Image (cartoon, rainbow, N blue to C red):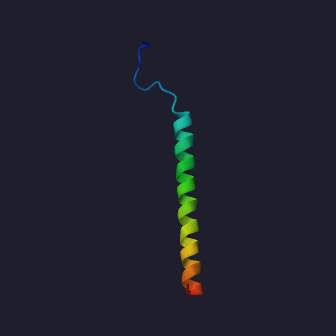
Amino acid sequence: MADHVHGTMDTGAQEKTYAGFVAATKWSVIAILAILVFLAIVGA
């Protein structure tokens, strides 16, 4: 088994995945809020 040195792992893929998750969450919340506001205005 290879020796692991703490702090040497490349985390680029994890950081890109996390950034994508945060962006998707942000836009999902914005879309949900927009739908709720629309429904409140229309009176549904």
The x and y percentages for residue 5 are: 41, 19
Tell me the quadrant of the picture where the N terminus can be found. Answer: top left
Which residue occupies 41% across, 18% down?
Answer: 4
Which residue occupies 55% across, 47% down?
Answer: 19
The x and y percentages for residue 2 are: 44, 13
Tell me the quadrant of the picture where the C terminus can be found. Answer: bottom right
Q: Nearer the viewer, residue 39 or 2?
A: 39
Q: Nearer the viewer, residue 29 or 10?
A: 29
Specify the quadrant of the image occupied by residue 42: bottom right
Residue reaching furthest to the bottom: 43
Above or below, comparing residue 25 to residue 8 in the picture:
below
The x and y percentages for residue 31 are: 58, 67
The x and y percentages for residue 33 are: 54, 71
Specify the quadrant of the image occupied by residue 39: bottom right
Numbered disc total: 0
Which residue occupies 57% across, 54% down?
Answer: 24
Residue 3 is left or right of residue 43, and the answer is: left
Residue reaching furthest to the front: 44
Above or below, comparing residue 16 to residue 31 in the picture:
above
